[in-house]
Amino acid sequence: MKNQYFGDINDYRKYGLLRGLADAGLSIGVCWLLTEDDGQGDGELRRYLAKPSHWRRYDPELYDRLQRLRHPGVQRDLRHAAEWELVPGAIYFDEIVTDTEGQRDAYFDAAFEALHGSDVIFFDPDIGIEVPSTGRGKRGSASYIYWTELRKAYVSGHSVLVYQHFPRVERARFVPFLAGRLGDELGARQVAGFTTPHVAFFLVQQPIHGEILGKAAAVVESTWRGQIKLWPPISSLSTIPLQPIGSTDG
């Protein structure tokens, strides 16, 4: 996550999803995996804030709070998420993560300590889950979350939500593939995917949270119809366990 993207259309959907999970009664911890801004433009992805007749209906309270970004002098800063209470009761870890492996180890030690009481931990890397070409501690690794880190969160008893940028592959195949890989890697039977026009989110559920998260996921899809689509397309994720499709290094 970078501060420069705070409050864009992807953020609006992201906070809508997190709010839906929080409204189900589970506590949310957010590990931003914050990286330094790179000076690139944001593609005018905040134009939705000037179109309330179309966008406000999905979550009026959230939309109105994000409208503060249009006020003079208000900076794009993810710390506003806590200040503006965008996700009820959420706890945030907002230290900067770098490519250095030693710093990354310390970063996650501190993050897991800060978020240890959360039912669900959301990881928000710049790109998503690790790729073979960028090893942990290598240049560019700060943009990824690694399997060892996701696994540690899950085996510690947290359900895990993770951001994933779409690679240049067929989305209809990518979503079930990565859901299956997550199930295999983390030893989980229930994994849901949430797809949006630009990015996806994957929810790896602890058995104890499965029923409530399944119902919450269905509510999110209904509330955000046309903006957030649930995979697999069932009304309650808790009724059908994930069948792993096998893992690959690709």
Image: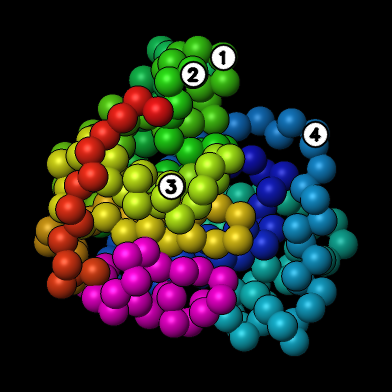
How many other residues sit within 10 Å of disc 3, few (<14), some (14-19) or many (≥20)? some
Label 4 sits on a secondary structure element that is: loop
Give the residues drawn in magenta, as a range.
212-236
Circle 2 is placed at which residue position?
A: 134
Q: Nearer the viewer, mark 1 or mark 3?
A: 3
Circle 3 is placed at which residue position?
A: 174
Q: x and y percent of residue 249 in the render?
A: 35, 25
Q: Nearer the viewer, residue 81 or 146?
A: 146
Give the CA separation, mark 3 to mark 2. 20 Å
Give the CA separation, mark 1 to mark 3. 25 Å
Do the numbered discs 3 and 2 sit on residues whose CB atoms are within 8 Å?
no
Circle 4 is placed at which residue position?
A: 39
Lower sequence index among marks 2 and 4: 4
Give the CA separation, mark 1 to mark 2. 7 Å
Position of residue 159 relative to residue 53, above or below, is above
| Residue 175 included in the magenta stretch of the image | no
Do the numbered discs 4 and 1 sit on residues whose CB atoms are within 8 Å?
no
At label 2, the amino acid type is Thr
Circle 1 is placed at which residue position?
A: 139
Q: Nearer the viewer, mark 2 or mark 4?
A: 2
